Amino acid sequence: MSQSTLGDDDLFGEAAAEMRADVEEHLDEARSALPDPDDVWDAEADNVLGVLNGLRSSLDVEGAAEHVRQAKKWYVIGQRAEAFDDPEDLEAAIEELQDLIEMVEEAHELVGELTNTMPQLRGALTDAAEAAEAAEAADADEEDEEEE
């Protein structure tokens, strides 16, 4: 019986090590899938809309979010099985990545809103400028008529 128990303990230890390795691997993959800081900061475009579209594209974190989800799934299983000797570092890494992904997702939403707003704003400003030009032309015509 003790031989069987020793074998079970060895298998559990091996499984726990593999589970920890899986969590760490998914965390590494999540970090690798995050947007490149230079892609987020640098912009090359002819206009604001081009800059916003480029920024919105660079803020894609779906791959990173999926890896964090997988890491958390294996972490929760391992934690409930009490398989990890020191789970605090894994938990901290998962929370840090979740917070970062949330920040990027919020920025993505804001950029998306701006991307939708800017053409409307340009149109409204164009209409206002045309109305101002028309009003100035009408005022100039009135002044010309008064002088005659």
Image (cartoon, rainbow, N blue to C red):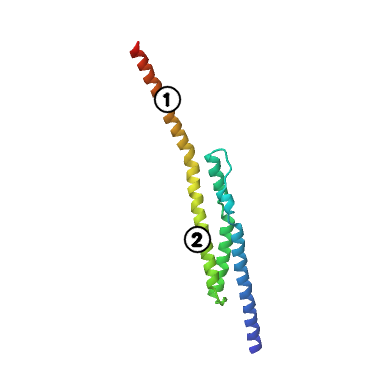
Q: Residue at x 52, y 63 (%)?
A: 96
* Location of residue 112 with respect to 103 vertically, above or below: above
* Left or right of 112 on screen, residue 31: right
Q: Residue furthest front?
A: 147
In the rendered image, is residue 1 in sight? no
In the rendered image, is residue 44 in sight? yes
Q: Residue at x 58, y 51 (%)?
A: 38
* Left or right of 142 on screen, residue 46: right
Callout 2: 10 Å neighbours few (<14), some, many (20+)?
few
* Location of residue 126 with respect to 27 vertically, above or below: above
Q: Residue at x 60, y 68 (%)?
A: 24
Which numbered dot is residue 99? Answer: 2
Instruction: Please provide percent x and percent y for residue 39.
Output: 59, 50
Going by the numbered disc 1, the residue's amino acid type is: Glu
Instruction: Please provide percent x and percent y for residue 124.
Output: 44, 34
Q: Nearer the viewer, residue 132 or 11?
A: 132
Q: CA distance from mark 2 to mark 1?
A: 50 Å
Q: Residue furthest left?
A: 146
Q: Quadrant of residue 137?
A: top left
Q: Nearer the viewer, residue 98 or 9?
A: 98
* Location of residue 116 with respect to 20 vertically, above or below: above
Dividing the image into 4 quarters, which one contains the C terminus? top left
Q: Residue at x 58, y 68 (%)?
A: 74
Q: Secondary structure at mark 1?
A: helix
Mark 1 lies on residue:
133
Q: How many marks?
A: 2
Dividing the image into 4 quarters, which one contains the N terminus? bottom right
Q: Quadrant of residue 3?
A: bottom right
Instruction: Please provide percent x and percent y for residue 48.
Output: 52, 40
Q: Residue furthest top?
A: 148
Going by the numbered disc 2, the residue's amino acid type is: Asp
Instruction: Please provide percent x and percent y for residue 134.
Output: 41, 23
